[in-house]
Amino acid sequence: MVQTVSRRSFFALLAAFSAGPALAAPPAASLRPVLRPKGLHKQGVPAAEALIRASGLSGQVGFAVADTGTGKVLETRVDTLGLPPASVTKSITAMYALERLGPEHRFETRLIATGPVENGVLKGDLVLAGGGDPTLDTDGLASMARQLKAAGVHEVRGNFKVWAGALPYIRTIDNGQPDHAGYNPAICGLALNFNRVHFEWRRAGSGWGVTMDARSRKYRPEVAVAKIAVKNRKVPVYTYEQRGGTDHWTVASGALGNGGARWLPVRRPDKYASDVFRTLARAHGIVLKNESVSATLPEGQTLVSHESPALREILRAMLKYSTNLTAEMIGMTATTVAGDKPVSLEASAAAMSHWAKTRLGMKNARFVDHSGLGGTSRMNAGDMVAALNTPLAKEQLKPILKQIPLRHEDGKPNKAHPLTVVAKTGTLNFASCLAGYVTDRNGTELAFAILTADQPRRNKLSKSERERPQGGRSWNRKSKRLQQKLLERWGAMYGA
């Protein structure tokens, strides 16, 4: 449509352009866009308290966040409140071990001969001696058996002994966990496959065929140190007792279905490792007698030595996969090298607590283990942020922390999120924590700690409920969503 202009309108418009000087003066206000006041975008950022209320999370929430460049604490909420740190404890254990042992430390497992080897015959005992290596697996033991044969040994006249006294024997990490929890095995100076045995079952006619083996990437040797029987019942799913140094399990037929597998904890890791090594040695023609446990390390010549990866890489994997056994063995080794061999897990954790207080400024931290599995450990967010702002944490811990993906509202990873987070997660029943570093696209880096827990709900759980408590997953999801919302708040408030 074309718009037309009348004769009268045309002359009125011409008169306006020819008006006096007053109409030709510059405007009183600039026509340029007005700059927004500095920090105006922050006015739309939700307050932390509003985020907590909106989360629907029951229990307590404590947090602290600080600038890593200046160390200035930017925001806190009940930062002195002591809550279970769960697996965030492992980040403290990592620093403890890095300082005490050094990042290049390697653990050694040995085969020792107490007598001479003549014409392929060992005229003495063969000793499998543990050195506290938490990464030893069946593949590693198979390599040792192969090296023993390559060293010219084809017969052992003496006894086969096992020594695991580099660390004290501890039956479980946390006595409050279910017996069948694979993340709660026994500890001593010799470990194999994270001290877990692989239980597998398959439907066979009217019953089930079951196996217990020490499987790894290459091998699946069956074991004699752990046995299982299927019982016609629905509950309990598992029962356990130890008889004569052997783990005896039963499992309810009503829980098996047509087939499946899971890892069960091992309660005698020394006998487990020696049982598997005897099988692997026999595959190379070396027949060994049943093992006997040696209380002291026998003297002799080292025939074979197996080294672990460097400590830094072990810790990187520990922080990524949150392996409890690794944390406990490394933590106790770090205490031992300081000259004070612990008699229990609690004693070693107390030594680490004292170290954290004096070295990291964690004035109120109280750990009962090195993994965080024990629910009576306590830590507050302010102490954790102080630890994260130390040179030890920024130089040695931060490079080995796992990157934590931030997510869309539907739960899918948001690869384009403007924030990058490297941190350690921690999860127990009705307790969820996150601590580490968050960086925006402009390079502004913050150290943070978020601790959440519903202690009344935790305290009501029975031992059998602790593996999968009712409502636990929903509570954990709410906590994790809140953690991301807080991180996004801090990125908007304190980022460049």
Image: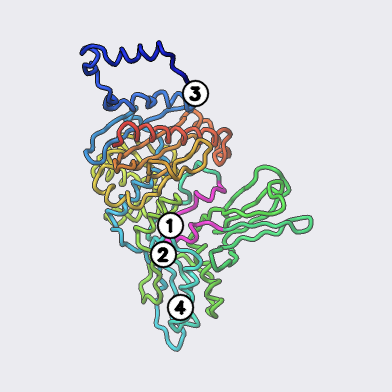
Asked if residue 233 lies left or right of residue 14, the reply is right
Q: Which residue is mark 2?
A: 130
Query: What's drawn in magenta, residue-wise?
Result: 179-197
Could you give the CA–CA distance between mark 3 and mark 1, rounded to whole angstroms?
92 Å
- Residue 418's spot in the image, x, y percent? 38, 41
Dot 2 or dot 1, earlier in sequence: 2
Could you give the CA–CA distance between mark 2 and mark 4, rounded to whole angstroms?
16 Å
Q: Which residue is mark 1?
A: 188
Q: Nearer the viewer, residue 331 or 381?
A: 381
Asked if residue 143 lies left or right of residue 38, the reply is right
- Kindly identify the amino acid type of the residue bearing the numbered disc 2: Gly
- Residue 328's spot in the image, x, y percent? 40, 51
Dot 4 or dot 1, earlier in sequence: 4
Could you give the CA–CA distance between mark 3 and mark 4, rounded to whole angstroms?
99 Å
To which quarter of the image does residue 362 belong? top left
Q: Residues within 10 Å of mark 3 (few under 14, many from 20)?
A: few
* Mark 3 residue element: loop
Q: Which residue is mark 4?
A: 148
Q: Are marks 3 and 1 in contact (CB under 8 Å)?
A: no
* Mark 2 residue element: loop
To which quarter of the image does residue 334 belong? bottom left
Q: Are marks 2 and 1 in contact (CB under 8 Å)?
A: yes
Dot 3 or dot 4, earlier in sequence: 3
> Would residue 344 be visible to someone looking at this image?
yes
* Mark 4 residue element: helix
- Residue 491's spot in the image, x, y percent? 34, 35
Q: Which residue is mark 3?
A: 2
